[in-house]
Image (cartoon, helix red, strand yellow):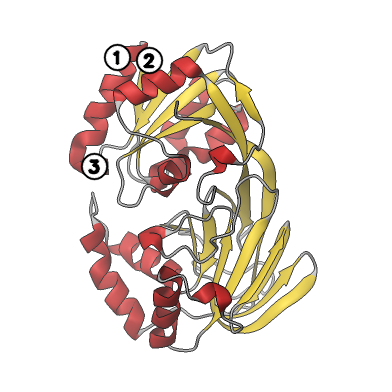
């Protein structure tokens, strides 16, 4: 079944010794409804709730990780960005995760058919069915390690994520993307790249690169519709483009499902992807990787490139609590 890892194997299990439930809620998600839902879930299970806070997640993430064990369930109440922030603690602890979606796209919850109600979550916890899925790992030019569940990319989508992050002042809606998208159309982020997949050169040129662990993508654009979270591989898609209009054309073609048959699109699968580029602007799971391109590049000592970043896979690195 396309779009849901729950139907493809990948290490099903039963969480037989559930010892704790930890709730992480983002106050900015769902126009405030994330907090009320988080409190409801926490009260139903006698659980502690940790609120995310602006800025670096280091402090509140340490609180979360201190509470998680391999037999815990972490209910993340918020959007894909909230889940992305919690991901390092989930992978390190081996805890199972359930995404109670309160964001703008909620791609992870869509992947597994997760329902964001206290009743649905209670039923899932009682059933305790889990599966292990792959996690992507990106190493930026500065050596920062960034985990992702959905995708990492470089191109106009990363440019929009960057513009939105710099302008953001609290909660966002789909309309929040309108101005950043128009700005990106006029002045697009279209790096020149050399992309290697498992040591083989896939492409050299200017355009938009998506490295996907999941078939899900915002606005149902889904550039890597065959990507699986349980195959131990990353799907690599490169759309050649030199202008904002060309990039917009590829977005439209992907939304309509036409880009998959285009001979102009470069596609591959692999475990290790290396990218050399003249512009380091990256996003992972919809969030701009703030440090990329903001510091000097270790390989050259300047900020003009070439920048080198890599992506890899952690097979079965994340445990997911499945909806019942």
Instruction: Name the disc covering residue 103, or none.
Output: none
Q: Is residue 302 above or below residue 228?
A: below
Residue at (30%, 23%) from the top-left corner? Answer: 118
Mark 1 lies on residue: 43
**Helix, strand or loop at mark 3:** helix
Q: Position of residue 140 (x, y in %)?
A: 60, 60
- Crowding at dot 1, Cα within 10 Å, few <14 / some 14-19 / many 20+, comes out as few
User: What is the C-alpha distance between the residues marked 1 and 2?
Assistant: 6 Å
Q: Residue furthest right?
A: 199
Q: CA distance from mark 1 to mark 3?
A: 19 Å
Q: Which residue is mark 3?
A: 30
Q: Nearer the viewer, residue 70 or 121?
A: 121
Whole-angstrom CA distance, mark 2 to mark 3, is 21 Å
Front residue of this view, candidates 140 and 112:
112
Q: Secondary structure at mark 1?
A: helix
- Determine crowd level at label 2: few under 14, some 14-19, many 20+ residues with C-alpha closer than 10 A: some
Front in this rendered view, residue 307 or 94 = 94
Q: N-terminal of the two: label 1 or label 3?
A: 3
Is 251 placed left or right of 18 in the picture?
left
Q: Earlier in the sequence, mark 2 or mark 3?
A: 3
What is the quadrant of residue 167 in the picture?
A: bottom left
**Residue contact at pointers 1 and 2, CB within 8 angstroms:** yes
Q: Residue at x 48, y 73 (%)?
A: 155
Q: Position of residue 180 (x, y in %)?
A: 29, 71
Q: Which mark is residue 47?
A: 2
């Amino acid at each position: 079944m396309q779009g849901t890892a729950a139907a493809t194997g990948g290490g099903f299990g039963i969480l037989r010794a559930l010892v704790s439930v930890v709730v992480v809620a983002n106050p900015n998600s769902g126009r405030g409804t994330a907090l009320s839902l988080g409190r409801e879930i926490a009260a139903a299970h006698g659980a502690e709730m940790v609120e995310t806070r602006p800025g670096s997640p280091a402090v509140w993430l340490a609180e979360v990780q201190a509470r998680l064990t391999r037999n815990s369930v972490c209910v993340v109440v918020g959007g894909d960005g909230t889940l992305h922030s919690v991901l390092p603690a989930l992978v390190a602890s081996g805890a199972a995760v359930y995404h109670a979606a309160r964001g703008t796209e909620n791609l992870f919850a869509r992947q597994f058919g997760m329902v964001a109600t206290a009743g649905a979550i209670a039923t899932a916890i009682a059933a305790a069915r889990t599966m292990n899925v792959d996690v992507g790992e990106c190493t930026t030019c500065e050596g920062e390690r960034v985990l992702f569940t959905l995708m990492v990319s470089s191109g106009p989508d990363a440019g929009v994520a960057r513009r939105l992050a710099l302008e953001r002042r609290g909660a966002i809606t789909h309309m929040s993307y309108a101005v950043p998208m128009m700005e990106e159309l006029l002045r697009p982020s279209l790096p020149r790249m050399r992309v290697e997949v498992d040591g083989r050169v896939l492409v050299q040129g200017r355009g938009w690169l998506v490295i996907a662990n999941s078939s899900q993508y915002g606005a149902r654009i889904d550039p890597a519709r065959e990507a699986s979270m349980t195959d131990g591989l990353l799907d690599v898609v490169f759309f050649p483009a030199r202008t904002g209009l060309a990039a917009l054309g590829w977005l439209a073609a992907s939304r309509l499902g036409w880009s998959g048959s285009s001979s102009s699109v470069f596609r591959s699968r692999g475990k290790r992807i290396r990218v050399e580029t003249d512009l380091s602007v990256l996003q992972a799971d919809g969030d701009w990787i703030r440090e990329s391109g903001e510091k000097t590049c270790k390989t050259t000592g300047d900020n003009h490139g070439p920048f080198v970043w890599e992506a890899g896979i952690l097979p079965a690195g994340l445990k997911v609590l499945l909806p019942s």
